[in-house]
Amino acid sequence: MIKNIKWLLLVSLTFVACNSDDDVTIKPDSTDGLPLTAGSADFSKYVALGNSLTAGFSDSALFIEGQKGAYTNILAQRFALVGGGEFKIPYMADNTGGLLLGGMQIQGPRLFFNGTGPVPVSGTPTTEITNTLSGPFNNMGVPGAKSFHLVAPGYGSVAGVPSGQANPYFVRFASAPSTTIIADAVAQNPTFFSLWIGNNDVLSFATSGGVGTNQTGNLNPATYGANDITDPTVFASVYNSMVDALTANGAKGVVANIPYVTSVPYFTTVPTNPIPGLPTSSAAQLNQLFGGINAALASNGLPARFSTLVSDDGNPATVEANPLLIRDESLINISGAITAALTPLFGAPTAGYLGSLYGQARHASNAAATRDYIVLPARGVIGTTQAGAPAPFNTIGVSFPMPDSTTLTASETAMVKTATDAYNASIQSIATAKGLAFVDANAVLNQVANGGLSANGFSVTSAYVTGGGFSLDGVHPSPRGYALIANKFLEAINAKYGSNLKGVDLGNYRILFPQNPANF
């Protein structure tokens, strides 16, 4: 029913996704040409807390080489130049990525770019989470952790993994099944810490296409689902308690705020209008259908939900673009009105089916004030046929609405932004009150997403695959992206504590990891 959608393949690349220098070169030089100094900071015992970003997660997995390139490890390498001590990392068992529980795979391997798109690397994960490691560890980043998980007893208990009450990554290096992440961090008596947490408090809601609950007003995180938005008061309370614990013995530190989820390519790669010009007969039929529904909406005092679709003009030099048909559960359900309006045109049985199908459907919006975001995995379903649906009402995104999980609607985006703004206000206020260095990660990622950031002769953008800032999962940074983040942390630390540590050269960090670990 529709032509081949060229953007589904995204790009056809001829470049090699790594640079010629595979080794990270760190030059012990300062920002000002003066002797290196830590300023008023003491980096002798650095402990890093956070989620997957802190751990070095990349390409949908955690693996050894990714962990080495974490922004936290880059910071530790720079700190070592001015008295920083050992930075111990709970390394995975391989560069394949993925996890096993009792020999059963519970997390898949990392992705690599095969020339046309991302695919999993071959091989079976070898990291068995019941093979616990001997700590303590300086990098306490736990992929998947939300703010309140850092203070949750039992988050490292293997018994809680199947039910989702515990985290398999923390199981591997928790000091005891009943401990908390913050307790294990504080027990090390750090002299300096970094804390970047809160992304997952909204991210899981967003990546699921809003399939979750906004828990604002619910102060009991024990009742939250995996994809829910954390109440801002809960976030502020937890965050403040963690900073209090970390600074109780005089430690200094650096914290970062939360980027808007819409800064990452997971939400910006797939356009809202990827449907090419339709066959003339198909466009006419759908326009008659959607026009009838718009008329029914108008008669009920409701605004139109559907655009006029364009047909293929037959000119290969022009590209027609039609919006995706999506489901929006925030809309008033007008199934009955649609059924009544369409019965004269299609008959009662078909009209009843269309009423149930389009009662909360509309075309996606690209307008700034009402922008919808289509998630990255939606590429695999657009234009395919919905099993069990009758033709011609079975083409997903064209005549059959996209699944709710594929779209972060404008109303859902607003909920995420409101929560993020509240979290960020708390983070900055607490950082100021405690005299901590502060990184405006939201501003940094916004720059990357809107024109890019340049350093060392490289421009880092959020363009999927080619931009250099993000890995193939569309959410986590690439090695070069992590290096850029490390430099921003160093800038904030220098400004706050009077140190003069120079950032790393982005040219020494690859864009993508190759398939074969031998080429790392």
Image: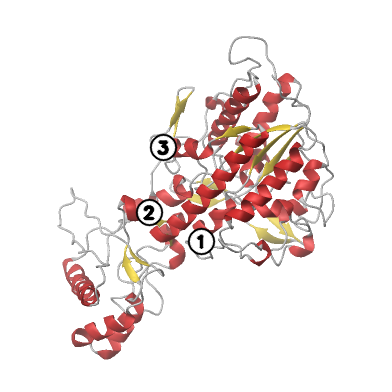
Question: Quick check: 216 left or right of 336?
Answer: right
Dot 2: within a 10 Å radius of its alpha carbon, few (fewer than 14), some, or many (20 or more) residues?
some
Q: Nearer the viewer, mark 2 or mark 3?
A: 2
Residue 315 visible somewhere in the drawing: yes
Question: Quick check: 407 left or right of 222?
Answer: left
* Label of residue 264 in the image: none
Residue 336 at what x, y percent from top left? 31, 84
- Local SS, label 3: loop
Q: CA distance from mark 2 to mark 3?
A: 18 Å
Circle 2 residue: 8
* Label of residue 208 in the image: 1
Dot 1: within a 10 Å radius of its alpha carbon, few (fewer than 14), some, or many (20 or more) residues?
some
Q: Amino acid at mark 1?
A: Ser
- In this rendering, the answer to whether 509 lies above or below 378 is above
- In this rendering, the answer to whether 29 lies above or below 487 is above
Q: Amino acid at mark 2?
A: Leu
Q: Residue at x 38, y 53 (%)?
A: 270
Along the polypeptide, which appears first: circle 2 or circle 1?
2
Circle 3 residue: 14
Q: CA distance from mark 2 to mark 1?
A: 20 Å
